[in-house]
Image (tube, grey):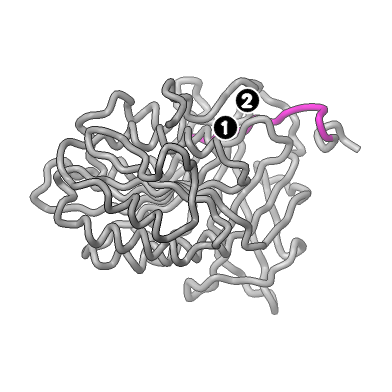
């Protein structure tokens, strides 16, 4: 058997280009856009998606032509191509596995009138989740705080999460980038294999110590999927939907931009369903070279009676020999 499938013989570090994102938008997604693979030029910025793992692991959502989730598919229904070369699937799961989830909630002054809808949406997500999920709340304005007590890293209790969400009044400036960095670092404290961040904000930032480039790199290095929900006012000069879409693309997540804040509840319920309905697929690349080259990924699925289905997953990665990359290296340790 090839060396790359023997446990412990080598680590594979996969790097995701910052411009990668799911090629097919999920139901209600705001960023239904396509794009060419990133340049392989060394000056092209890129970020790692997986550290010290033997397999490239994909979380794939499969949709029918009406946008509904497709369940009951088997390993043989999937084809995974890297640089147009068929790969051997070595990991395949379609189970409702417990997930570590961080809710990153903007409590700056620009979000004041939206706070009740945001809290209702976040709680709707909590109630739609697996009772075994590990969840935490990051509240931020110009300061970043964890909603749960310092003695409790995660919780699955709606009452505790409700208190964590409503315990911070809206006001002040916006440190969005710092909040995401803290949340990514905190996710590293879970034993859950699947990790998700849901960021609810207007995308503005006027108070962070971190930069957008740092966030994009660290988000890509993590194995978390990031969903963003952008709530914008026409008269708000700090609103920045472009930033939220960039952050999403670094991880292969989704960006939503509802016209009414009341729609956030339905979006959060939809995200919970998306997480629960994903297929996990892993393959050890036939190309073993860790040469820094860009590798495209394409996943196809054939349903019953030969029906072609839509797949939303990562579009590629950059193979690198760097084994020392770590996710979201915040100096404060995350808490």
Estimate how packed mark 2 is, as few (under 14), some (14 to 19) or many (20 or more) residues with alpha carbons within 10 Å.
Answer: some
> Is the C-beta separation of discs 2 and 1 under 8 Å?
yes
Residue 88 screen position, x and y as percent: 78, 49
Q: Is residue 11 magenta?
A: yes
Instruction: Point out the image quarter for the N terminus.
Output: top right
Instruction: Point out the image quarter for the C terminus.
Output: top left
Range drawn in magenta? 7-17
Total numbered circles: 2
Left/right placement of residue 92 relative to residue 251 reads: right
Left/right placement of residue 249 relative to residue 95 reads: left
Q: Nearer the viewer, residue 286 or 260?
A: 260
Residue located 85% across and 31% down the image: 3
Marks 2 and 1, how far apart at CA: 7 Å
**In this figure, which residue is indicated by the disc labeled 1?**
15
Q: Nearer the viewer, residue 262 or 284?
A: 262
Asked which secondary structure carries label 2, the reply is strand
Residue located 39% across and 41% down the image: 247
Q: Nearer the viewer, residue 262 or 17?
A: 262
**In this figure, which residue is indicated by the disc labeled 2?**
320
Q: Is residue 38 magenta?
A: no
């Amino acid at each position: 058997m090839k060396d790359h499938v023997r446990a412990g013989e080598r680590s594979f570090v996969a790097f995701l280009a910052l411009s990668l994102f799911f090629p097919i938008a999920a139901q209600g997604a705001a960023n239904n856009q396509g794009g060419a693979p990133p340049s392989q030029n060394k000056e092209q910025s890129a970020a790692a998606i997986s550290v010290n793992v033997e397999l490239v692991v994909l979380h794939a959502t499969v949709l029918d032509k009406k946008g509904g989730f497709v369940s009951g598919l088997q390993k043989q229904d999937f084809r995974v191509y890297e640089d147009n070369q068929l790969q051997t699937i070595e990991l395949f799961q379609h189970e409702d596995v417990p997930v570590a989830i961080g809710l990153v909630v903007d409590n700056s002054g620009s979000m004041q009138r939206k706070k009740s809808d945001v809290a209702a949406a976040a709680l709707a997500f909590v109630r739609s989740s697996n009772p075994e999920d590990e969840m935490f709340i990051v509240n931020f304005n110009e300061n970043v705080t964890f909603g749960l007590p310092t003695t409790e890293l995660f919780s699955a209790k709606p009452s505790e999460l409700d208190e964590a969400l409503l315990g911070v009044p809206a006001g002040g400036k916006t440190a969005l980038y710092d909040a995401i960095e803290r949340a990514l670092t905190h996710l590293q404290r879970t034993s859950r294999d699947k990790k998700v961040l849901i960021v609810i904000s207007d995308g503005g930032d006027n108070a962070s110590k971190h930069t957008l480039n740092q966030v994009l790199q660290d988000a890509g290095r993590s194995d978390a999927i990031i969903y963003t929900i952008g709530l914008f006012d026409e008269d708000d000069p700090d609103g920045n939907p472009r930033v939220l879409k960039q952050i999403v693309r670094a991880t292969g997540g989704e960006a939503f931009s509802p016209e009414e804040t009341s729609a956030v509840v339905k979006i959060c319920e939809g995200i919970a369903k998306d997480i629960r309905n994903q297929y996990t697929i892993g393959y050890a690349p036939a190309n073993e070279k860790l040469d820094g080259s860009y590798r495209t990924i394409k996943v196809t699925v054939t349903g019953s009676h030969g029906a072609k289905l839509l797949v939303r997953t990562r579009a590629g990665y950059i193979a690198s020999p760097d084994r020392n990359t770590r996710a979201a290296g915040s100096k404060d340790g995350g808490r």
